Image (cartoon, rainbow, N blue to C red):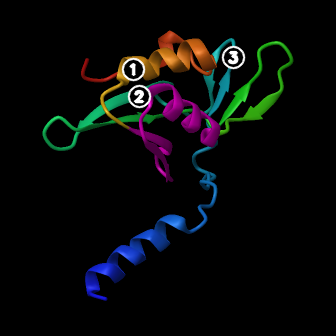
Amino acid sequence: FGSRFFRSLKFVVALSAPRSAPRVSPSRPAMQFEGAGGFEGNNVAGKVHIRMQQRNGRKSWTIVTGMPNEVKLPKSGRTLEVDFDKILRALKKSFKTNGLLIHNEEHGVIIQLQGDIRKEIAAFFIDHTALITKDQVMIHGS
């Protein structure tokens, strides 16, 4: 086999390695979201940013950043952890596209999906999941 095969094998092994949960530094506490009041914590903007990044030709990525790690239920006040794997699975199935989760220390969990589906993703998060409100969504470039 050529060196090209082994490079691709290293890439596959790197992708299949188990990912650890993102670490939260003491200087930046975990972002929380309250169902009634919005984000709580040290989030400067308090918004979920939905961007489109051009790849090549007509191909593009839709990138979602700023999602909260925990959600506080409005009635009971319980705090639940957000399951990004389930959200990604629902997004992929709803919009018939591929996507992945990127764990970044600075930006938290980033959801990356194929295609320019910014408005559809915003509607999904606002209407179907109710994780965020319309005021907390910032759609860039539309």
Left or right, 84 with respect to 64, comes to right
Total number of numbered labels?
A: 3
Q: Residue at x 60, y 16 (%)?
A: 128
Amino acid carrying label 2: it is: His
Residue at the spot of label 1: 138
Task: Pick whichever of labels 2 and 3 is earlier in the sequence.
Answer: 3
Residue 112 within the segment the image draws in magenta: yes
Q: Residue at x 44, y 69 (%)?
A: 12
Residues at marks 2 and 1 touching, judged by CB atoms closer than 8 Å:
yes
What is the distance, in whole Å, between disc 3 and disc 1 at their CAs? 18 Å
Place of residue 37 in the rendered image (x, y in percent of width and height, measured from the top left): 65, 14
Observer-nearest of 11 and 68: 11
Above or below: residue 28 compared with residue 20: above
Task: Pick whichever of labels 3 and 1 is earlier in the sequence.
Answer: 3
Place of residue 38 in the rendered image (x, y in percent of width and height, measured from the top left): 61, 18
Above or below: residue 51 compared with residue 124: below
Q: Secondary structure at mark 3?
A: loop
Residue at the spot of label 3: 35
Label 2, residues with CA under 10 Å away: few <14, some 14-19, many ≥20: some
Place of residue 102 in the rendered image (x, y in percent of width and height, measured from the top left): 47, 50
Residue at the spot of label 2: 49
Q: Quadrant of residue 2?
A: bottom left
What is the distance, in whole Å, between disc 2 and disc 1 at their CAs? 5 Å
Residue 88 within the segment the image draws in magenta: yes
